[in-house]
């Protein structure tokens, strides 16, 4: 009974994280700044709030990790910065739906990583579920690309490349996180280190393109603050917590529903139309996710 209740709680937390993460693309688009800038502010706010929580409620950052663990967290932070920066940049060249969909194709990579590097065992229906999910994502991306669904002045091909690189980066981020979180490292301590390293890396990316970090309207900073709190602390931090409790693919695969939620919000807020084909491919992805989550007892 306790195991069942624990799993129910995990899925509730997972659902909350999913909704929060799905708000990211909308907040980036509303902020109207370069993806590297949005990424930097998101990571700066996320890291500052995480460290503040550690100091207030945990009496400081304790259990200092080993040098090897810090190296892993450094690589994870760099991967996270690349993921956010490249993906948020892609939103300038692709509509929300296809951009988020391509990035969230990473569970296919994580399944391979989980099998090869972590020795995780999956049921046949989990492989089928991942296959269906990724097929839906691929078809949705192709449909969107063929119809050139991009914001004014956008370059769809460049946007696709940026989104693919963002997908690879986030797969590396979650894979390293899975490795580190298998050790006895507190979730908030782990995220505090990773977010701080990612914020520093992201600032270097901003300086490399010569864009300013300040001088924007007040509403831009409001959206950037929400970006650093809702999808960051209420999304990625919760996912990092679940990495220690659930299979790698089980945590990652549900995030693939982010394109669906984000696309609906983009339609409501920005008028980005969803064609019948796109809706069908989204349904295919949901079917795959259902198969992944309908697991037997471990």
Image: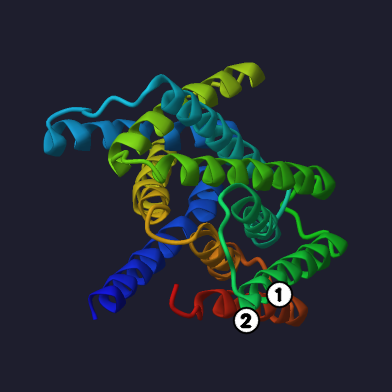
Residues marked 1 and 2 touching at CB (< 8 Å) = yes
Give the residue drawn at x 77%, y 62%. 141
Quadrant placement of the C terminus: bottom left
Q: Give left or right: position of 53 versus 170.
A: left
Residue 185 vertical placement versus 145 (above, below): above
Image coords of residue 10 (percent x, y): 34, 67
Of callouts 1 and 2, which one flags the residue occurring earlier in the amino acid sequence? 1
Secondary structure found at label 2 = helix
Residue 40 vertical placement versus 17 (above, below): above
Image coords of residue 171 (percent x, y): 61, 47
Foreground: 206 or 136? Answer: 136
Give the CA distance from mark 1 to mark 2: 7 Å
Give the residue drawn at x 58%, y 34%. 79
**Residue 201 bears which disc, if any?**
none
Name the residue that disc number 1 marks: 132
Q: Give left or right: position of 80 versus 285.
A: left
Name the residue that disc number 2 marks: 287
How packed is label 1: few (under 14 Cα within 10 Å), some, or many (20 or more)?
Answer: many
Q: Give left or right: position of 16 versus 261.
A: left
Q: How many marks?
A: 2
Residue 154 vertical placement versus 267 (above, below): above
How packed is label 2: few (under 14 Cα within 10 Å), some, or many (20 or more)?
Answer: some
Tell me if residue 122 can be seen.
yes
Give the residue drawn at x 60%, y 74%. 123
Q: Give left or right: position of 262 versus 18.
A: right
For residue 289, which quarter of the picture? bottom right
Q: How is the image coloured?
A: rainbow
Secondary structure found at label 1 = helix
Image coords of residue 178 (percent x, y): 48, 47
Give the residue drawn at x 41%, y 20%. 67
Quadrant placement of the N terminus: bottom left
Tell me if residue 154 can be seen.
no
């Amino acid at each position: 009974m306790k195991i069942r209740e624990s799993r129910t709680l995990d899925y509730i937390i997972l659902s909350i994280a999913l909704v929060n993460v799905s708000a990211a693309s909308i907040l980036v688009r509303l902020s109207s700044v370069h993806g590297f800038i949005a990424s930097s502010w998101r990571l700066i706010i996320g890291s500052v709030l995480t460290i503040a929580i550690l100091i207030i409620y945990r009496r400081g950052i304790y259990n200092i990790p080993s040098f090897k663990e810090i190296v892993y967290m450094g690589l994870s932070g760099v991967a996270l910065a690349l993921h956010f920066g490249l993906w948020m940049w892609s939103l300038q060249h692709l509509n929300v739906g296809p951009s988020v969909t391509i990035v969230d194709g990473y569970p296919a990579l994580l399944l391979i990583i989980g099998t090869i590097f972590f020795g995780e065992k999956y049921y046949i229906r989990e492989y089928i579920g991942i296959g269906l999910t990724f097929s839906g994502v691929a078809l949705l991306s192709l449909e969107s690309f063929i119809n050139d669904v991009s914001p004014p002045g956008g370059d769809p091909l460049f946007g696709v490349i940026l989104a693919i690189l963002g997908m690879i980066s986030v797969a590396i981020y979650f894979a390293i996180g899975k490795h580190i979180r298998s050790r006895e490292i507190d979730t908030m301590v782990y995220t505090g280190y990773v977010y701080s390293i990612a914020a520093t890396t992201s600032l270097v990316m901003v300086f490399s393109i010569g864009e300013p970090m300040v001088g924007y309207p007040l509403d831009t900073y409001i959206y950037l603050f929400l970006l650093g709190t809702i999808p960051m602390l209420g999304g990625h931090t919760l996912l990092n917590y679940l990495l220690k409790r659930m299979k790698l693919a089980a945590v990652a695969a549900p995030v693939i529903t982010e394109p669906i939620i984000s696309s609906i919000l983009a339609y409501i807020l920005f008028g980005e139309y969803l064609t019948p084909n796109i809706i069908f491919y989204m349904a295919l992805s949901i079917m795959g996710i259902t198969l992944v989550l309908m697991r037997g007892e471990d």
